[in-house]
Image (spheres, grey):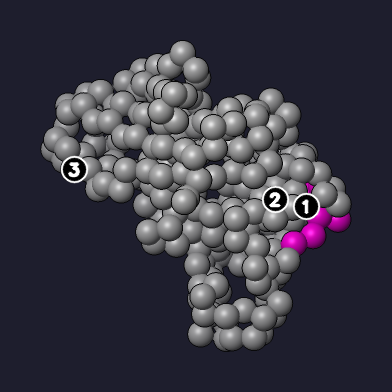
Amino acid sequence: RKEVEQDPGPFNVPEGATVAFNCTYSNSASQSFFWYRQDCRKEPKLLMSVYSSGNEDGRFTAQLNRASQYISLLIRDSKLSDSATYLCVVVDRGSTLGRLYFGRGTQLTVWP
Amino acid sequence: EAQVTQNPRYLITVTGKKLTVTCSQNMNHEYMSWYRQDPGLGLRQIYYSMNVEVTDKGDVPEGYKVSRKEKRNFPLILESPSPNQTSLYFCASSFRVAGWTGELFFGEGSRLTVL
């Protein structure tokens, strides 16, 4: 079983829509979770961390459900510029950076 | 300018011809790592290094070697490349190991084709 499984997508939504992605992880000891964004043919970049109590950054909300071992990313009021691939990242050793697991990515296209 | 630099950015080579993809960062980062990205498989970690002379295997280390003799450089070596190593490769670094806050600085990627 893969360490991190992610909604395959693609998601095609109109501007202004709300869209949510999920990502499940298999190691219950995992402690650190993040969402990255990758534009076409570019390197991934950190979008936001995922905190236990959930956290928000503008139109983006990240949540963690430890009992069900998944994290989610909610994007409200989608913009054309949100079109990208979204990757979840799980650290397998508490908060110590070592081995990382990336989800396969969920592709989002926002259309006018 | 703070950056992670990979070379070459594009390479077409033939099976069995040894090659090295260099990665250099100018941010004095402790942590460096290599990934390959393939359609449908996402980013997979090849090797990582938590400091000079400290390296460890990631998810898919077979067919690759690395070394970390200096803090700024972390080359990826393919001793005998095969077509299944055709991929997009990313190098990344981070300034902190313990209590990592999630930011990896990626290079622009190296697209490798093995014929």
Q: Disc 3 on helix, strand or loop? A: strand
Residue occupying image coordinates x 64% and y 53% = B58
Q: Which residue is mark 1?
A: B55
Residue at horizontal 41 percent and vertical 50 percent from the top: A104
Near mark 1 (Cα within 10 A), the count class, few <14, some 14-19 or many ≥20, is: many
User: Label 1's element?
Assistant: strand
User: Magenta residues?
Assistant: B66-72
Q: Please name the residue shown 34% across and 34% down the image.
A: A22
Give SS at disc 2. strand
Front residue (pair B106, B48): B48
Cβ atoms at labels 3 and 1 below 8 Å apart = no
Q: Are marks 2 and 1 in contact (CB under 8 Å)?
A: yes
A63 on left or right of A76: right
Label 2, label 1: how far apart the Cα atoms are: 6 Å
Residue B70 on the magenta span = yes
Q: Is residue A39 above or below residue A30?
A: below
Task: Between label 3 and label 1, give the one nearer the viewer.
Answer: 1
Residue A60 point in image, percent of width and height: 35, 23
Q: Is residue B10 magenta?
A: no
Q: Quadrant of the N terminus of chain B?
A: top right
Label 3 – label 1 distance at C-alpha: 41 Å
